[in-house]
Image (tube, helix red, strand yellow):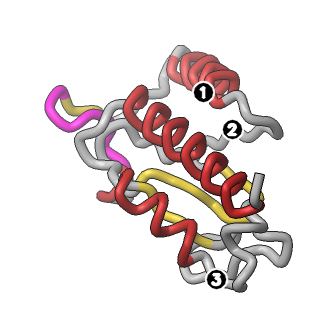
């Protein structure tokens, strides 16, 4: 697993850094990855077949989670195909400060640019709803 993380809100900077790292690893002589023209990268986890990429963002939504649940955040994110969960992964509680992990549910047969675009669109909408919930 190769991870790339960065504080801030510029998804493209994280993706560009990840892409540069992957290009460097793939250029090492003697390292070959299992790939399929039809399915993309073949990984050990079938849910990541294809790009092999999982992207997520930790974001504070204190107003949407003020009731102690992620219900309101899920109402916004779910129609966009995004999952909302605690920062420790699936089945973990949201942070006391309202921090949640947002990631696209789809991983099969989806392109990297679609993953990033879905995440960007979802975060934009969540932040808009967060402002509304704050009464701004």
Q: Position of residue 115 (x, y in %)?
A: 43, 38
Q: Is residue 82 above or below residue 87?
A: above
The residue identified by callout 3 is 69
Q: Does the magenta stretch mainly form a helix, a strand or a loop?
A: loop
Dot 1: within a 10 Å radius of its alpha carbon, few (fewer than 14), some, or many (20 or more) residues? some
**Is 105 contained in the magenta span?**
no
Query: Is residue 52 toward the left or the right of residue 16 in the image?
Result: left
N-terminal label among 2 and 3:
2
Which of pointers 1 and 2 indicates the residue nearer the eye? 1
> Which residue is drawn at the image coordinates 55% and 46% (left, top)?
125
| Helix, strand or loop for disc 1 | helix
Residue 4: which numbered mark, if any?
Answer: 2
- CB under 8 Å between callouts 1 and 2? yes
Query: In the current view of this chain or complex, which residue is farthest to the front?
Result: 135
Q: Is residue 50 above or below residue 82?
A: above
The residue identified by callout 1 is 15
Q: Position of residue 31 (x, y in %)?
A: 48, 27
Q: Position of residue 24 (x, y in %)?
A: 61, 17
Q: What's the CA distance linking mark 2 and mark 3?
A: 28 Å
Quarter of the image holding residue 55?
Answer: top right
Magenta-drawn segment: 37-43
> Which residue is drawn at the image coordinates 60% and 27% (left, top)?
15
Query: In the current view of this chain or complex, which residue is farthest to the left?
Result: 38
Q: Position of residue 48 (x, y in %)?
A: 37, 51
Tell which of 36 and 16 is nearer to you.
16
Tell which of 13 and 53 is nearer to you.
13
| Helix, strand or loop for disc 3 | loop
């Amino acid at each position: 697993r190769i991870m790339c993380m960065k504080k801030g809100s510029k998804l493209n900077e994280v993706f560009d850094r990840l892409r540069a790292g992957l290009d460097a690893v793939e250029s090492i002589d003697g390292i070959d990855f299992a790939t399929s023209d039809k399915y993309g990268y073949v990984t050990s986890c079938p849910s990541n077949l294809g790009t092999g990429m999982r992207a997520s963002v930790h974001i504070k939504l204190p107003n949407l989670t003020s009731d102690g649940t992620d219900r309101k955040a899920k109402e916004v994110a779910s129609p966009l195909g995004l999952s909302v969960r605690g920062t420790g992964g699936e089945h973990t509680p949201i942070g006391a400060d309202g921090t949640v992990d947002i990631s696209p549910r789809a991983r099969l047969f989806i392109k990297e640019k679609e993953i990033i675009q879905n995440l960007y669109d979802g975060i934009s909408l969540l932040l808009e709803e967060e402002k509304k919930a704050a009464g701004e």
